Amino acid sequence: MFVLPGTAAQVRDLPDFAPLVAKQAPVVVNITATQSSRVASPLQHLGEDVPMPDWLRRFAPKGSEQQPLPDDDNESTGSGFIIGADGYILTNSHVVEAADEILVRLSDRREFAARVIGRDKRSDIALLKVDAIGLPVARFGNPALLRVGDWVLAIGSPFGFESSVTAGIVSAKGRSLPDETLVPFIQTDVAINPGNSGGPLFNLKGEVVGINSQIYSRSGGFMGISFSIPIDVALDVQQQLRQYGRVRRGRIGVVIQDVSRDIANSFGLKEPAGALVSSVDPDGPAVPAGIKVGDVILAFDGTPVADSTQLPRIVGVARPGSRAVLQVFRSGATRDVPIVVGEFAAEEEEAAPAPVVAQVPPRGTNRLGLVTQDLSASQRREFKVNGGAVIKQSYGVAARAELRQGDVVTAVVARGKTEEVRSSEHFNTLVNAFEAGISVSLRVQRGDAVNFVGMKVSGVARK
């Protein structure tokens, strides 16, 4: 038989998953949730003829994708795994959402009715309990030890096919997804499909390192990008569900944004790192601690904040009422700010700003591509400001930064100094004095929201 050079060695280096599957498959369960009322699945409303933007979707229950729901009982299936010999099971919250009856089927075909001990929608974790003893129990690994490129394996019930096994590698770690800032997802290329929800992700030692939760898909099926909740996050959630019946998360009461290279340069930061405070909740813990708009939070209680997506996770695991120290960059210097952690409360999602299409700048456009005017008396009352400049039109670099008509510029930050904007004329004087290529940040108010927008000065003013 002809063998290509190196083929045998390469085959020997590939992992043998069979022993792992034989040993760990019994800890995986199939979950059937029955809803007596009509409950739309996360994918049910999407038809093949509907244009689908790139988005992250939770897995659809069996039989629900692209199909109308019946008027009678609606069944959906998912996966889970046993974490206690006395019948405790972890799965995804969306698997058992609105379920009137939950049936758990073990690998040996035994079936048990399950009850929900608790659900946490923010992390998409649910803790179930069945009346059984002596069950096989999953072993847990440390997700922090996973490396990008490591082999991982999933066991679940895609499309209702129980005990299906798929394998792949870790594609990335610590992924933040839209509206999922509290979970640092593990990204893999393991084939995950509807019905895999809540199933375990194993490392090669047979340890559970994650819970399969979401996929990136246009069609609802596998497209090579899957996301799992790290098991340490899930175990902390289930412990709180047992203890409190809910999950308590820390908050410090600030709205933050990422620090771009231009923002870092304008503030005098050496590197674009940390979380920039764009507004402060007047009733939150940040106010008595002295946190201000324009502060850049570099660390929370000794844990560095590499980018803004990390801060909600780090603060979220802190217990409400505990004391912590924020490392803050302000006015060119770093300082430590003590704070008492509050309790997290969900906030309404804000609609994304509409993009602005650039046009030929008219006369009166400053060097950032903005045409502004003074605020009227009613606008000053509405925005609760004494000065500032309201944007009439935006072009060029300002349009690309998505500044738009009605935004109010209240301050300009450059070379580490913040200058409050007194009027439209004052704003234009400040901006037009900058040399080309310098990084500046504008503090912009849009409705009740405040953000810093970083950009480079370019072009000349049109007088």
Image (cartoon, rainbow, N blue to C red):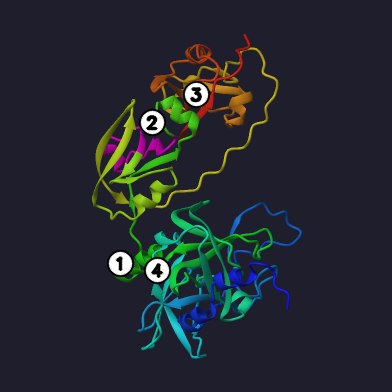
- Quarter of the image where one finds residue 351: top right
Circle 1 sits in a helix, a strand or a loop, which is it? Answer: helix
Residue 220 x, y percent position in the rendering:
65, 64
Circle 2 sits in a helix, a strand or a loop, which is it? Answer: loop
- Quarter of the image where one finds residue 82: bottom left
N-term-proximal mark, 3 vs 2: 2
Residue 33 x, y percent position in the rendering:
53, 78
Residue occupying image coordinates x 58% and y 81%: 162
Split into 4 quadrants, where in the image is the C terminus? Answer: top right
208 or 169, which lies in front?
169
N-term-proximal mark, 4 vs 3: 4
Callout 2 crowding tier (Cα within 10 Å): few <14, some 14–19, many ≥20: many
**Mark 2 or 1, which is nearer the eye?**
2
State how far apart marks 1 and 3 are (Cα): 48 Å
For the record, the magenta segment spans 272-297
Residue occupying image coordinates x 52% and y 66%: 151
131 or 436, which lies in front?
436
203 or 252, which lies in front?
203
Residue 214 x, y percent position in the rendering:
55, 62
Mark 4 belongs to which amino acid?
A: Gly
Residue occupying image coordinates x 28% and y 46%: 302
State how far apart marks 4 and 3 are (Cα): 45 Å
N-term-proximal mark, 2 vs 1: 1
State how far apart marks 4 and 2 are (Cα): 40 Å
Mark 3 belongs to which amino acid?
A: Ser
N-term-proximal mark, 1 vs 4: 4
Q: Which residue is mark 1?
A: 244
**Residue 439 tag number:** 3
Q: Which residue is mark 2?
A: 294
